[in-house]
Amino acid sequence: MIEIEFHLKQPDISWRANIHQLNGDVLRRHILPKLKSTCYLIDFKYCEKSYSGDILCDSGSKLGSFIIK
């Protein structure tokens, strides 16, 4: 199991989730229900060195972040 900590800017919330596989579809399933934005086309930027990533709107603006624990 992989533990991920999510942080969203709108609303200002954080939570943790356990997943079996790290990919965009799995991340979207955890993020979209909590997202209070009209931006539902989201993408991710991930850094393997820091085990962290950004949650991005399709326009490129940052919606939040996540980190693998």
Image (cartoon, rainbow, N blue to C red):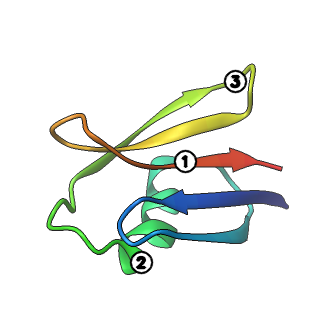
Q: Earlier in the sequence, mark 2 or mark 3?
A: 2
Label 3 secondary element: loop
**Image depth: mark 2 or mark 3 in front:** 2
Residue tagged 2: 34
Query: Would residue 36 be found to the left or right of residue 21 on screen?
Result: left
The numbered mark at residue 23 is 1
Report the residue at 69% width, 46% height from top: 67
Q: What kind of residue is marked 1?
A: Asn
The numbered mark at residue 48 is 3
Report the residue at 42% width, 62% height from top: 28
Q: Quadrant of the N terminus?
A: bottom right
Q: What kind of residue is marked 3?
A: Glu
Q: Which of marks 1 and 2 is nearer the N terminus?
A: 1
Packing grade of label 1 (10 A; few <14, some 14-19, many >=20) is few
Residue contact at pointers 1 and 2, CB within 8 angstroms: no
**Distance between the Cα atoms at labels 1 and 2?**
18 Å
